[in-house]
Image: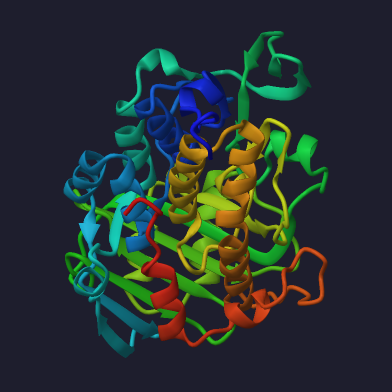
């Protein structure tokens, strides 16, 4: 950039940014942009930010991206969650197959951190002014105009912005207008999950248990801090139909995992039926582009994955930091979004492909949505892949 045409500040590029979705990615991006002095508003369709019966794992790549945005948030998360020190792989009978100490902190500078999804959302939201998060605001569309982007909401409200980011998940409204690729694809698995305050002699502090059956079933138990255990279960299912009655859902889980070793039956029995979330697992094939004009995507709206690598939130944190960086160093919004895609597309394609392969779903390597080498790179050895995945650091680190 010549001295006569200096790089514009992010404030000059986009003084008003609208983010659709107050999930983890949307809130993180709002924090990052507001630290740059950009007026950023988040619009969420839910009437309240209520507790979700889920836990999640943050890995070094995601934590380093969060640290680059706000080191204080990372320290708050570490205080609120549990840093895994041991993974226990077991058969469905409860017999131990392998115990593996977790050495991510020593190797990559950040731990394997488990936390309740709702607690993480609370910590992120607390970093934003209350007036920056607009609840009960369901986006139904947008139109680009000479002034930027006009966003339409179900209640008739219209918002004008310089930049629109769809961070509204796998069923993103923004994505459907931008990409027009229809509904996500069913992965052939049903899942159940819950977070419960629970103690059991087989559940060690700062430990995780993965139990595997020989029929496509799996059950996971993770300490997520403050006395809470997150459990999740999955099983193959020909259809994606979910039960509507909470008691029937709990009975289904107990039936599907009947005969499994403890603490499976005990923790499901101890969980309030209304706290169990039953969901089919969906994903989408990778994209080669997710931006157009002054509109782009972030997180699951851009690159949803089946949850086998625990990278959904971590990729969203990477997205948020990289998008903020691109806006800080470009001379136009269009150039910034092009740089954002360049920094993110290939990496997220590889993670999507690896997730698909490990989740017993293979994408067509000849698909036009794949760049050359993505499928091969996704099949790196486990140690190579982990080094590539966890060593990722944002450009300013």
Query: Where 340 falls versus 333 (above or below)?
Result: below
Quadrant housing residue 148: top right
Residue 35 % position (x, y): 35, 28
Query: Where 314 falls versus 168 (above or below)?
Result: below
The residue drawn where x is 59% and y is 63% is: 306
Toward the viewer: 218 or 29? Answer: 29
Residue 104 % position (x, y): 26, 72
Observer able to see residue 138: yes
The residue drawn where x is 38% and y is 31% is: 31
Query: Where 170 falls versus 45 (above or below)?
Result: below
Toward the viewer: 185 or 255? Answer: 185
Q: Is residue 318 left or right of residue 144?
A: left
Query: Where 381 falls versus 138 (above or below)?
Result: below
Toward the viewer: 271 or 56? Answer: 56
Q: Quadrant of the C terminus?
A: bottom left
Residue 82 % position (x, y): 22, 57
State how the image is colored: rainbow
Residue 61 % position (x, y): 37, 60
């Amino acid at each position: 950039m010549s001295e006569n045409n200096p790089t514009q500040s992010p404030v000059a590029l986009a003084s008003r940014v609208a983010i659709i979705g107050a999930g983890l990615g949307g809130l993180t991006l709002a924090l990052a942009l507001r630290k740059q002095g950009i007026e950023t508003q988040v619009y969420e369709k839910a009437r309240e930010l209520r507790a979700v019966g889920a836990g999640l794992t943050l890995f070094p790549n995601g934590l380093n991206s969060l640290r680059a945005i706000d080191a204080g948030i990372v320290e708050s998360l570490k205080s609120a969650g549990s840093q895994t020190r041991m993974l226990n792989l077991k058969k469905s009978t409860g017999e131990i197959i392998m115990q593996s100490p977790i050495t991510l902190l020593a190797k990559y500078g950040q731990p394997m951190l488990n936390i309740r999804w709702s607690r993480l959302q609370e910590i992120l939201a607390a970093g934003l002014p209350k007036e920056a998060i607009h609840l009960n605001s369901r986006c139904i569309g947008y139109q680009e105009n000479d002034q930027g982007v006009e966003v339409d909401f179900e209640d008739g409200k219209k918002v004008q912005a310089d930049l629109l980011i769809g961070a509204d998940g796998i069923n993103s409204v923004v994505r459907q207008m931008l990409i027009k690729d229809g509904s996500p694809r069913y992965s052939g698995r049903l899942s159940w999950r819950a977070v419960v305050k629970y103690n059991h002699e087989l559940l060690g502090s700062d430990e995780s248990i993965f139990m595997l059956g020989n029929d496509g079933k799996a059950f996971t138990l993770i300490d997520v801090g403050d006395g809470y255990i997150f459990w999740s279960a999955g099983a193959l299912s020909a259809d994606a139909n979910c039960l509507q009655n909470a008691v029937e859902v709990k009975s289904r889980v107990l039936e599907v995992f009947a005969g499994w070793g403890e603490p499976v039956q005990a923790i499901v029995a101890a969980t309030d039926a209304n706290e169990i979330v039953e969901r089919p697992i969906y994903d989408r094939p990778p994209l080669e582009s997710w931006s157009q004009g002054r509109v782009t995507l972030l997180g699951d709206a851009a690159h949803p994955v089946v949850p086998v690598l625990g990278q959904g939130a971590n990729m969203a944190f990477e997205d948020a930091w990289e998008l903020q960086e691109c806006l800080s160093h470009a001379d136009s919004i269009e150039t910034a979004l092009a740089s954002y895609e360049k920094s993110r597309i290939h990496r997220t394609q590889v993670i999507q492909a690896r997730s698909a392969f490990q989740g017993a779903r293979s994408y067509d390597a000849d698909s036009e949505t794949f760049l050359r080498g993505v499928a091969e790179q996704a099949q790196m050895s486990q140690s190579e892949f982990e080094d590539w995945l966890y060593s990722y650091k944002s450009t300013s680190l």
